[in-house]
Amino acid sequence: MLTPQQNNFRDKNDISGIWKFAADPQKTGEKENWNVKFNNAIKIAVPGSWNEQLEAEGLMHYVGNAWYATDFFIPKYFDNKRIWIRIGSADYYSKLWINEKFVGDNLGGFLPIDFEITSFVKTGENNKLTLLINNELNSDTIPQGISSDEYGEENRRREETFPAARFDFSPYGGIHRPVYIYTTPIQFIKDVSVSTYVMSSVKGKIKLKIDIENSSANQIRLYITGNGATIIKDFSLEGSSFENEFELNECRLWSCDDPYLYKLKIELLEDENCLDEYSLKIGIREVKIDGFNLLLNNEPVFLKGFGKHEDFPVIGKALNLPLLIKDFSLMKWINANSFRTSHYPYAEEWLDFADENGFLVVNEVPAVSLDFRKTNEKTLKNHKDFIKKLIGRDKNHPSVIMWAPGNEPNLVGEESYYNGSGDKYWKEICEYTKQLDPSRPVTIPNCQRAGKDDPVFIHSDVVSLNRYYGWYENPGLLDTAIKRFEEEMDYIADKYKKPIFITEFGADTMPGFHSISDQMFTEEYQSEFLKKYCELIESKDYTIGEHVWNFADFKTPQHFRRVVLNLKGIFNRTRDPKLAAFTLKKIWGK
Ligand code: GCB
């Protein structure tokens, strides 16, 4: 479904706020009909992870079932409309009841969940919503999960974290983005896909696909407003799908320096009678790979920025608009032009802001550290479903320049991964991604342990490397680290003849720790580490960017190598700069 919006034909009410909540560690709620009523309810803020909000109630590290409930009013004027709910994201599995009746379930976090609830609600009255959320993961899910027992069976006790996770960020649970009740007309514009191409510095091309639900409509009218004019185009419509492409002369392109957005308004008409309208902002730009270059509007672009996380004290992974503003302003301050949504899709507001402010985004699917001993047909299916939903949500954002359908497969360094299983899997995933969106390159960041012959390189358009020489290997030995890194990059560039993007490099740093010699965890070490990496990366013709790991310190599962947080942030968790922030600002300001 399209992002809900308010206009002459559609309505949208945000029902986020303070809701009722109960943890259900014994998983008795469904048997005991908690969809009708649950006892011992406490209060929780939506959006917001349950973990830090309800620490005093023992939920800091809670993984399991939890119930949410709220009432919401549906006004009388929603009669004769189709009524929908959008839960911005619920991590990771959820089941919804409206007025005690089961509506549907959803597997997969980080993306919106839409259900039509017209037949479940009463207009002019309060209605009741109950949601069950479970944040457990397993081998079939994206991301994959692991249990404490599995760590034991695999003889990997020293790698075990609590909560047990396959990734290095907190497996927060809860509703992490706003919840909307919204309407569409009976006949409505169901989906819009826009891809843009650049013919010259003043001429663009727009390819448009519109899907319609239930239609007796016979006409589409477009209003393209921008650059001092409104162009109106009329098309006749047959059936439920419409495709067209047209050129835009005297076009103002979208770029980092001039992130110009046109407004596209679409009207769905039946004999001149408007049935529905939908508006979106579009940027005319084209992304291409040419030899070792990444081209934006036929000009090479070098990515400077970060891998990030959605993470902040108390709210956990929830959307926090003041933080969004602060993070973008710090990224501008430091002269960054891009970021990666490591390791999952972020709230859409991030992409809207990137569109408006000329940031380039590498948009990632949460297939983080897939373990190929455990990956199976269900994992593959869930993975593909996720890619489809992500592209469905984010395809129209000019800021999104690349898809990352995964990150760091085979972190466990399993041999069989190289005997065909990795190759087969990534071929299918990358082809599927490109079939859904042929207009953007794909990349899968590779980890040091998976090595320089990772099958992801063959199927990626851009070779992305996460490297930690000088940290996990060669600790404290920066010169050796840089030498090893250079040898490896040269080998990979020569072998695969593809542009190389360093998607992660960084060092944990405790603000306030200092040293005059190379000493891990000090501010000087992080600063010097990043400076040397950037010098090397920027000296190579085959590189297209450097993303420091991480923008800010973030919460991780418990492990002896993490002091509550992953401390590789250039800013601390509350966004105060470390010494390296000033170093990067200088390097990227050149
Ligand atoms: C990585 C992962 C990232 C970790 C990071 C680290 O390679 O992609 O999720 O947080 O290393 O700091 O170890």
Image (tube, rainbow, N blue to C red):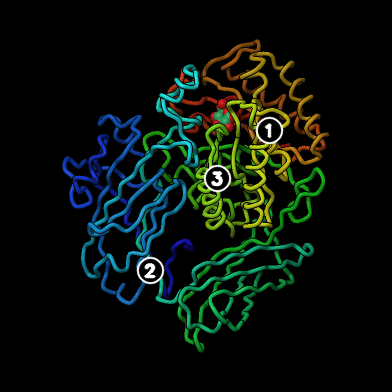
Q: Are marks 1 and 2 in contact (CB under 8 Å)?
A: no
Alpha carbon distance from label 2 to label 3: 34 Å
**Which circle marks residue 419 in the picture?**
1
Callout 1: helix, strand or loop?
loop
Q: Position of residue 484 (x, y in %)?
A: 75, 21
Q: Position of residue 197 (x, y in %)?
A: 72, 62
Alpha carbon distance from label 1 to label 2: 51 Å
Q: Are marks 2 and 3 in contact (CB under 8 Å)?
A: no
Q: Amino acid at mark 1?
A: Asn
Above/below status of 206 relative to 435: below
- Label 1: few (<14), some or many (≥20) within 10 Å? few
Residue at the disc numbered 3: 380
Q: Are marks 3 and 1 in contact (CB under 8 Å)?
A: no
Residue drawn 60% across and 23% down?
507
Residue at the disc numbered 2: 183
Q: Looking at the image, can residue 147 be seen?
A: yes
Mark toward the viewer: 1 or 2: 1
Above/below status of 290 relative to 485: below
**Which circle marks residue 377 in the picture?**
none
Residue drawn 44% across and 77% down?
187
Q: Is mark 3 within 8 Å of ligand 1?
A: no
